[in-house]
Amino acid sequence: MRSIMAVAVNTIRQILRLKIAVIFIVLLAVLLPVMGLTMTGDGTIKGRLQTFISYGLSLASLLLCLLTIIISVYTVTSDISGRQIYTVVTKPVRRYQILVGKFLGIIILDFVLLIIFTGAIYAITIMTPKIAGVSDEEKTLLKNEFFTARQGLKPEPVDVSKDVQQTFQSLVQKGQIKPEQLQDEQSRRQIIDDITRSKELASRSAAPGQILNWQFKNIKIKSTDPNTVLFIRFKYEVSVKPADMMVNSLWEIGDDRDIKLGQVPKTKIYQLSRRDRIQAFHEIAIPADAVPADGYLAIGFINPPQLNDTVVIFPPDGLEVLYKADSFSANFARSVLLLFLQLIFLCCLGICTASFLSMPTALLCCLIVFATATVSSFIFESFDTLSSGTELFYRFTIKPLLHILPQFDLMNPNEFLVPSKLLSWSALGWIVFIVVCVKSLLLFLLGILLFSFREIAKIIV
Amino acid sequence: MEHVIETFSLTKVFSDWWGRSKVCAVDNLNLKIHKNEVFGLLGPNGSGKTTTIKLLLGLLHPTKGRSLIFGGDSTEPKVNSRIGFLPEESYLYRYLNARETLDFYGRLFDLPVEVRRMRIEALLDMVGLKAVANRAVGTYSKGMARRIGLAAALINDPELLILDEPTTGLDPIGTRQIKDLILALARRGKTILLCSHLLADVEDVCDRIAILYSGKIVTEGMVKELLQQTDKRQITTGLVSDAVIDKIRQLLDSSKTEYSIATPIDRLETFFIRIVSAAQQKVHTPSGAVSTTKLGDFLVGQPEGEIKAGIIEQLASKEAEKKSVEQPASTGTVNKPAEVPLPVDHDVLKGLVKPREPAKPVAVKKQTDEPAEEVRQINKNILDELTGSPEAKKNKEDKADKQQGG
Ligand SMILES: Nc1ncnc2c1ncn2[C@@H]1O[C@H](COP(=O)(O)OP(=O)(O)OP(=O)(O)O)[C@@H](O)[C@H]1O
Ligand SMILES: [Mg+2]
């Protein structure tokens, strides 16, 4: 243990001598306050905070990720190319202990830097409203919509299979599907797929005069504060774009079960009419007393025929109920932990590649992996659509490889902090398990294996 | 006899990137080095000395054959905690200073903090870097870097010391000191493997040598046997009158052999040591390494008042740990010899001559009072002895019994 710590301390010293760490630290130390002062966002205080937190965290995360890659590769390769490693491996330390020591050194440094930078971002975020002198109204708005951690609930997908079967049967009966089409498995499948798609779309669309309904269960609002609100977050698509790109709507939100039985509802039902831009997310704030104790909530959307003349379509993820489930600080801390997980992975990656490659090659490998991991969703999507011809090839080669990478874009703290969405402990725990216990550990073990059996003194030109 | 290093047809073939074999750097090497032996590995450049060492230490994997150190694998912590290794060049962490460097290696050996502190000071003193110990080793000169490398190799008081060209870059005093160190360690029962091109050095200290040529051993044997000129005799005398010389001439003439009579001149080494130590008296803050010929107490195994047990053995017991903390003065005496004028190596040399001599500080005091002639006398004796038979080396206690020239 003493020898591992000796290596760790030496690694930290080595890194601090490397000017690059200092440059990064200075860069962040200068940029963060500047960003805090100059960023305005969309002009509102909430927009300003969202922009700052999003750019601040992105910058800190990018710099720390790059720093981690560079130092983890450097500390291993420089010892080998400078041959200091000769005097270390011939001491009573096992080779894995050397790598563990290096890992610890880097991670300790990363942790300290991360705490400092995200601490600064947190402090600036908290201080900004106080310095900017916001009104009480804005304060409540911030409290409800920004300084919070909201649980998001999406409606369960509508089961359309029965409907599809019925339609299919009726089409067959009406003779609109020809017998030879029925015989051929492929065209039969095609027809069913087509029907399913149109039914699904229908379940999400409302022509003028039509109503859409969603039911939610298990909305658990912990707060007893009477001012607590919950949010309905939504986005519209339309069949025909209106000239001003605006859509009118009527909403009814509350517990509708008593009404269905013809009784007076026990909790309040909120009705409102709105006018919103299409293809952008909007939020409706509703007092939390709309939700009864059992956590049920129904949402009704009405496409008013006298005001609209287009079909309004909700995209698949187009509606969500959000409510406060935790504090902003706790959510911030967990999101920062998410960044830390990325650093752990990159550190393992750097050490692993450096254990058998030279500095430039290892750096290149790490940067490629980092870039790929950062846009992994995009890559998955594009491969999924593009690979129709080479499906098999893709599924057994590129896809498993891509799955080895962690999906950094899904681990982006901004995904949670900007829309004030809850990152639950369980979700975080799962990511920890996948990214640290599986992917990082595998890489690290691979690095240890390669390093242990490597001929340290071998020179290849 | 117990073997410390054993190799069994050890072979290393270097191949290029494509896997084509290029160089056979070590070729079926069968090396046996006994316990408490000073073994010299000689050979021209590129003959495979360094490669052999790297194979022994597990830095390279043998193409064929295997090697054992202390009967085990050299990558086992149990084995390599007993080894000290000085690589061909000083590969140091440039940003650490001398003290931090030694501390780092001490920690790798898992040495307790008191032992580490004690040894670091003793070693810095020994290699003469105490005055510059707070400078980053990256700024050191070649010889200074070599010295700190040597100190790092000794931090664990190794039972087996592997030195790859230890004297490159060292000044004559440093060279001399390494030789003294090797002899002192040998006296304490340590084993030393030494690679060097400086044949005079090897000759001075090695019991046995092997000469490598392109990876193969060409000659191997005891230095004494390899170098002995059995058909010659040498007589060394004090200053005698011409009359006596004439008598000797007559005697030799009658025995009909070729002979020559001359006044011996000082070796350049002795001369250099004398000049530098005189200069050292005047300059108190040197910019480089301070030349000393003293050896770390714990290495020589002669701490204050103690003769047989080295400090290390003492420190092994808990009681001794306390003792060393209570008596911080134990390292203090090491400083004294630096102030001794004229033959600086006197102290060490005297130790070699009379290892059982008690109370060192007294001896130091005495030296300055002693007549110069006697000093030179002892000095000469030991130099002769160093160049003489290794057997004699091991029976040094008995000064009177010593015979010269075989
Ligand atoms: N990593 C390596 N790759 C290829 N060849 C090597 C490598 N290391 C050493 N050699 C070759 O092996 C041979 C022996 O080299 P080695 O360093 O052991 O020589 P040496 O006896 O220590 O020489 P010197 O006296 O110059 O230090 C040389 O021909 C050298 O070119
Ligand atoms: Mg060599």
Image (cartoon, coloured by chain):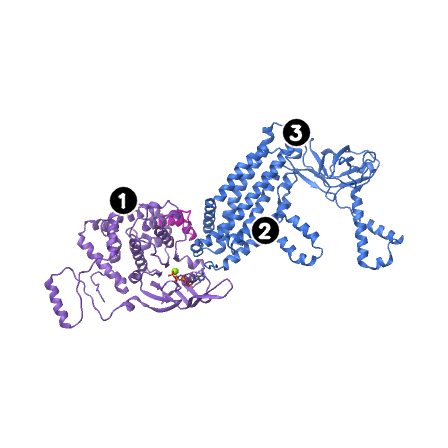
Chain colours: A blue, B purple
- Residue B174, magenta (yes or no): no
| Foreground of the two, A150 or B172 | B172
Q: Residue at x 50, y 57 (%)?
A: A451
Labelled disc at residue A369: 2
Residue at the disc numbered 3:
A138
Q: Which residue is mark 1?
A: B283
x and y, in percent, of residue A293 in the image: 73, 37
Q: Secondary structure at mark 3?
A: helix
Parent chain of label 2: A
Tag 2: amino acid: Val
Can residue B113 be seen in the rendering of this structure? no
Question: Residue drawn 49% across and 47% down?
Answer: A105
Q: Does B19 sit left or right of A39 as displayed? A: left
Determine whether, in the image, residue A335 is placed left or right of residue B208. right
Q: Position of residue A259 (x, y in %)?
A: 82, 36
Q: Residue at x 34, y 56 (%)?
A: B168
